[in-house]
Every structure is written in structure tokens, then in C-alpha cells.
Amino acid sequence: MMTGCEIMQEAKGLIENVYGIRINGIRPFRAGYILETNAGRKYIKACQYTKERVLFIHQAKTHLLMNNFRNIDPYCLTLNKQPYIEIDDIPYTMVDLIEGRECEFDDDRDVIKATEALALMHKAAHGFFPKGPYVPSGLGKLPTSFKKHLEEIRKLRKKAEKERNSFDYLFMEHYDDFYKSGLKSLEILFASRYNKLVEQTMREGMICHHDYSYQNILIKGDTTSIINFDYCSIELKIYDIVNILRRRMRKCNWDIDKARQILDVYRKIEPLDQDEMKVMKSMLQFPQKFWRVINRYYNSRRCWAQKNFTIMLEEVIQEKDAHKNFMEKFDTL
């Protein structure tokens, strides 16, 4: 079986012809390859998804560019104006390589830059109504998702009762607290105007990045770029804000003042109303990391994994009190 590098070397002529460029060098980078070309440095990667999804992402990026949000990685188009090339029946996308260092979520200055970039992206995202058969959307799915995850936590507890190793005991000892936190999250969600926000987003259009993590936020001087829109979808913009809050809070022991700083920076650029704050509260109340750790542990079951997963579960448990205090103060934000 050919390696990725060999596939790239073999496809070099095809890529040159389809994009109208000359490739002088190829080297692996992240999940793809850097191409040294006569038109500058490019980054090419195989897509783990369909051509239809590439076309959706291309529409989203084009909408942001048309609305003056330029610090992203638009696709390079082929000579036939396509945003992808097929190599052995697999779609590949190419972008201009964006230089910069990855965002550090334990650095206040980086977090402020990342928050400003996100708010500007959301501001430009209004009015996005994609065409075509494939439109990924998470709108309206939050209650079902929370219920499903809570049911999984409950079922996995029964599994833990049968197995009885150190991970199982730790899970069972703290199960009640996290399960109650999940129920409280649902309670807040059902008392919120979530459905109104869903209808409003359907009417007004929005792009959610859906993977707003450190490696997708590149900082160079005064410029903060957002890259890798692979998971973008039509969704409430607060999904991305909750993502950045969770990542930051885990680095600062759920310090409410650090959360206020993020929200204040965001609100200077893009408004957040009380209905959005209520749904955000519900999302932050949900024991997302607890669910993820136990779900991955019981569904992967590699013998080497127990120690790693036990450490991860201990980390979630150590945050419990700080998280509880944070949620009690959330309404002051």
C-alpha cells in the first residue's frame, strides 16, 4: 500500500495541471502536506468527508470573505473553478498556507485575540443561506443530545457496577453529582427560549465554526486567523462561545472574572441577549467532559487505556467544586 507521501509524489503532475501551478517540493504537515510552489506555499489534505460537504464549506468561507472577514483559509480553486481535486476518488482541498503560532488558552492576550476574531467571524456570518442538497445543521438538536448523553451516563453506571475496577469505583462514587448537574442543565434549557433562538437563526442565517480549538486559531503579530472549517455548520453562534469559555475555564480553575473578560470582548463586537445567555448557562452546566471521558473509556476498552482515562476522570472531578461555584455566579456575567 502506498504511503501518503508516495500518493502525493505520484499525483504531482495531476495537481500541477488541475491548479495551473508548478510544485517544487512536498513535505508532510499536520493532517496533509505543504507544497512549495511557484505561487507560494500551499497546504493540501485529503478530506474525510464528501464533495458535497466541501461545497458547503466553500460557500461558508465565500460568504465570510464577501462580508469582509478575510482572516480565514479560503480554498484555492482549480482552473475549472472547483474547490477540490479528486485523487484516487478521494476529494483533496488546497489552501494558501497561513503562517502563525497556535493560540494558547492559558494566555489572556491570546484568548482576547481569539475572542475578537470569533466575534468578527460571527458578525460576518449573518445572512448565510447555503444552496445545495447538503446543509449540515445542529439547530434544534440540543435537548435530544443532552437527554441521549444523560441516558448513556445512566447505562454506563450499570456497566461499572458489574466491572468494579478503580475507574468504575471512581465513576460510581461521583455519578450522582454529575448526573444531577446534567438534569439541572436540562431544566435550565427547558426554561429558556431555545426554540425562539433556533427559529431566529434559521431566519437570519449563521455560520458556526464548530471546532474552535487552539490549533485552528493562528496568531501572527496583530492578525488572528481562523482556519480549518471542516466541521462548520448552521448552528447557534453560542456553540462556539461556549467552546472558547470551556477551554479557557479549564486553564484558570473556572475563574468567573476570566469568563466576564471573554464575554465583554465579544459583546463589544457582536451582541448577546439574555435568551442566548440562558442557553449558554445550560450548555456550561452540562457535564460534557465527564460524559466524554466515561463514554470513550467504556467504548474503547484498550487494556493500556485504564490508567490514562482514570487520570482524565480525576481531572474532571478535581474541577467539580470550582465549576459549581462558577455556575452559581453565572447570572452576574
Image (cartoon, rainbow, N blue to C red):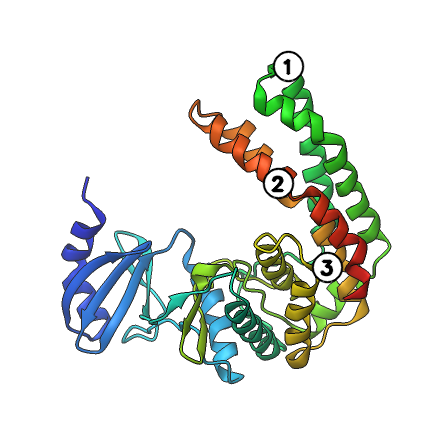
Separation (CA) of disc 3 from disc 2? 20 Å
Splitting the image into 4 quarters, where does residue 267 fall? Answer: bottom right
Residue picked out by circle 2: 316
Q: Which mark is residue 311?
A: none
SS of the residue under disc 3? helix
**Which residue is at a point 80% across and 65% down the rendered structure image?**
332
Across the whole image, how many numbered discs are drawn on residues?
3
Give the vertical position of 277 relative to 64 (above or below).
Answer: above
Tell me if residue 236 can be seen. Answer: no
Q: Nearer the viewer, mark 3 or mark 2?
A: 2
How crowded pointer 3 is (Cα within 10 Å; few <14, some 14-19, many 20+) is rated as many
Q: Amino acid at mark 1?
A: Lys
158 vs 180, nearest the viewer: 180
Q: Amino acid at mark 2?
A: Val
Q: Are marks 1 and 2 in contact (CB under 8 Å)?
A: no
Tell me if residue 238 can be seen. Answer: yes
SS of the residue under disc 2? helix
Residue 278, percent across and down?
79, 61
Mark 1 or mark 3: which comes first in sequence? Answer: 1
Residue picked out by circle 3: 280
Give the vertical position of 297 relative to 107 (above or below).
Answer: above
**Which residue is at a point 68% across and 32% down the rendered structure image?**
153
SS of the residue under disc 1? helix
Separation (CA) of disc 1 from disc 2? 23 Å
Residue picked out by circle 1: 162
Give the vertical position of 328 relative to 175 (above or below).
Answer: below
